[in-house]
Image (cartoon, rainbow, N blue to C red):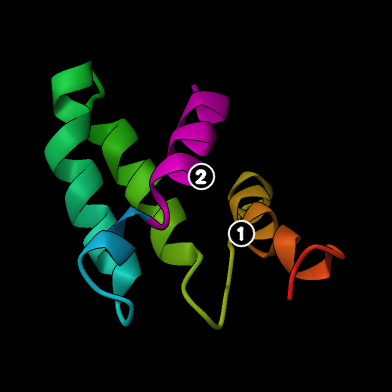
Amino acid sequence: MRKSCCKTACLFHDTGMLKTYRGHEEASVEICQEILPHYGYSAQNIEVISSMIVTTKLPQCASHTWIRSCVIADLDYLGRPTTS
């Protein structure tokens, strides 16, 4: 289930930008907490996903290796030549 939570967090982590730029991580958490119960996610899994989303907020501080993967994915685009 960890892998599924990680993928879901990566999908939702910037959805809050639809509402606001500053503090979009918190807005992303609100969006995922509203939507994910309709797709059968448990409260425990939603809490894990929410924690992963908040971890992408700068400065990033991931406490677990599997949460760091979400942070790494969030910053991955910065080193790519297509980033301008």
Of mark 1 and mark 2, the one earlier in the sequence is: 2
* Residue located 16% across and 27% down the image: 37
Magenta-tinted stretch:
1-14
Q: Is residue 75 above or below residue 39?
A: below
77 or 7: which is nearer to us?
77
Name, please, the residue furthest toward the right. Answer: 81
31 or 51: which is nearer to us?
31
Residue 34 occupies quadrant: top left
12 or 69: which is nearer to us?
12
* Residue located 24% across and 43% down the image: 32
**42 sits left or right of 83 in the view:** left
Secondary structure beneath dot 2 equals: helix
Secondary structure beneath dot 1 equals: helix
* Residue located 58% across and 50% down the image: 67
Q: Position of residue 71 (x, y in %)?
A: 62, 59
Residue 25 occupies quadrant: bottom left
Q: Which residue is mark 2?
A: 10
Q: Label 2 is placed on what type of residue? A: Cys
Q: Label 1 is placed on what type of residue? A: Asp
Name, please, the residue furthest toward the top. Answer: 40
**21 sits left or right of 57 in the view:** left
Contact, mark 1 vs mark 2 (Cβ under 8 Å): yes
Q: CA distance from mark 1 to mark 2?
A: 8 Å
**73 sits left or right of 43 in the view:** right
Q: Position of residue 60 (x, y in %)?
A: 57, 74
Quadrant holding the C terminus: bottom right
Q: Which residue is mark 1?
A: 74
